[in-house]
Amino acid sequence: MTEPRIIQNFVGYRAIIITDARAAVSQLESTLSKLGLSISHPDIESGCVQLREDVFTGDQAVLFIDSDMNVAIDTPSHDRMPQVPVIGIVGVEAPSRLKSLMRLGATATLRKPVHGGSVYSALFVGVNEFRYRRVLTVQLEEQERRRRGRRYLMKAIVTVMKSTGCDEDAAYDRLRRESMRQRQSVEDYCESFMRSLPGAHEPDSKVQGMTCAEKSK
Amino acid sequence: MAAKRYRIGVLFSNSGPYGVVSGSMRNGALLAFDEISRNGAYGFELEPVAADPAGDPARYSQLSAALLGEGIRHVVGCYTSSSRKDVIPLFEKYDTLLWYPSHYEGFESSTNVVYTGAAPNQHIIPLIEYLAGHMGKRAYCVGSNYIWSWENNRILREGLSAAGGSIIAERYFAVGETDHSQVIQAILETRPDFVFNTLIGTSAYHFFRDFRAACMARGIDQVREIPIASCSLSEPELDEIGPGAMDGHISSSVYFSTIASETNRRFVEAYGRLFPSGPSVSADAEASYVAVRLLAASIASAGSDDVDAVRQVLAQQRIEAPQGPVWIDGQTSHAYLTPRIGRSNMSGGFDVVLAARQPVKPDPYLVQATPRYAAHPRRPKLKLVQ
């Protein structure tokens, strides 16, 4: 996956502002309107903000959260990773407040009272940093999945070496070429290859791991 | 009973690297003050209180603080964006208004600034459309090393990329640098469809002269083969370039002194009468004139120079300016202006080759005029392998 393209024009985005200090964010609202964003203020009930599912549809929402409120954000996701960009509105610069913003996934902050001249910068950095982190997360998951599949690659190389008498480099080249022909990663191809062999069974990762560890001692 | 008198700051450099244009801006403002003082209908007098930073960046803040410290609530001034950025915190601290009368790169809308110069959608966007349609799509960018050049080149790159064109190179020089021999050589070797110039002041004047001379030495018809396009070139600068190289340059502007209207004819005549030794009238001089006229109209409407009162009535003022109707957009505090494309001539003026049919709404953040995504710095290089 390639690096995400930088977003510079936010027209059509939806800004959801969570604050009880509307006067302190009047410049935020005014500047967001100039930038072409629509603005909404979700209700806060008993210290909790319930964000509707539709807030997260369309990939064009950004949350502005006032860290002084100490509200809980209840989103449809329980993931550590937020589904939308979060920009913190900072009043009290106490570590506990800043930590709460980090836990919510804030990728940029605005000092209260919000100054109009800093809004575009925070929006630009916040949204693009969120997109970059999201891509990194997906890449990390993909790399982890492929790492788990490396054991099939090892097995497939040994199998090809035994069946053809070639060395390990030639076996790898052969598997790699075939995986490209089938438009698969070499790990995915080797997994299919090993499963297709007569008598193939699902390898037990724990047993496999232990065996390798014991061998390496 | 004596007429009410309001003191208005006038903050322009009369010398330094961009003193020529800045001087014409001061003159444009002073012409408006002169007209208002002669017009009894206003019922008040505006007293200009002039301050001259002489092109020294540090002096802008010092002089602004002095003006605002005296109780002045409105200041017309600044040419470069860096000077404007330096003084804005002071205007916010005193909650006063800076009337900023220069075309600029946008991405700002302070509630303590009224912008009467062109926003980027009123100068660079029309220029890109004209260049892509009439000159070609391969550009070579030469500019002074600061925000005006960086941002205009970014917008040009995006516009040309969308039209299938390209930027051959971007080269930047320190403000005031006058040796451009290497970049001129590179331009002549790469032969772009046009040069996009964002050099300012003395740097620009030298570049125009040296590039024309280099082309002539090689038998190249510079105007026809490698034209230079700018969105900052104005009449006083043509005078500085001189008769050997002043003609044939493309400029995007909301005002040229050659606009054929009775209002403009009177404006140019009055300017020439009041300032016979120059500098010539320019787009930024007209924007300064417009700023003072709008300020006077707002004070007349509000009945006071109180900043909140002026803000409330500002968007209701509409004046017949030398360029045509002008009024302020209440949301962004920028002006509705009429974009034009001009080609410089040997008389030190511009022939208007294209004009918008009506004033264009300002879009300082280019919300309506640029793509969602920033352009990639480089196109992927792909070749056919089979």
Image: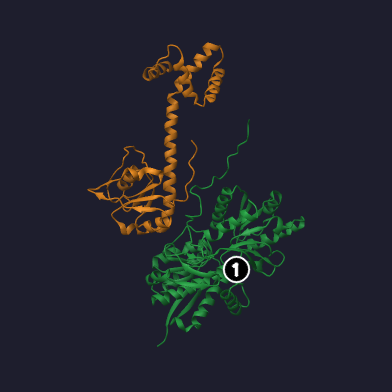
Is residue B155 toward the left or the right of residue B308 in the image? right
**How many residues crowd around disc 1 within 10 Å: few (fewer than 14), some, or many (20 or more)?**
many
Quadrant containing the C terminus of chain B in the rendered view? top right
Reply above or below: B243 against B377: below
Helix, strand, or loop for circle 1?
A: loop
Q: What colouring method underlies this structural image?
A: by chain
Q: Picture coordinates of residue B69 (x, y %)?
A: 41, 72
Q: Residue at x 55, y 64 (%)?
A: B357
Can residue B360 be seen at all in this image of the molecule? yes
Q: Is residue B12 visible?
A: no
- Where is residue A54 drawn, in percent x and y? 34, 44
Q: Position of residue B345 (x, y in %)?
A: 68, 66
Name the side, left or right, on which B207 lies relative to B255: right
Identify the chain of the residue marked 1, using the numbered disc in the image: B
Q: Residue at x 59, y 66 (%)?
A: B18
- Chain A: colour as depicted: orange
Q: Nearer the viewer, residue B243 or A103?
A: B243
Which three-letter amino acid code belongs to the residue tagged 1? Phe
Which is nearer the eye, A171 or B259? B259
Between B289 and B331, the one lying in front of the other is B331
In the rendered structure, the answer to whether residue B311 lies left or right of residue A161 reads: left
Task: Identify the residue at horizontal 58%, vertical 48% (top origin).
Answer: B161
Chain B drawn colour: green
Residue on which disc 1 sits: B256
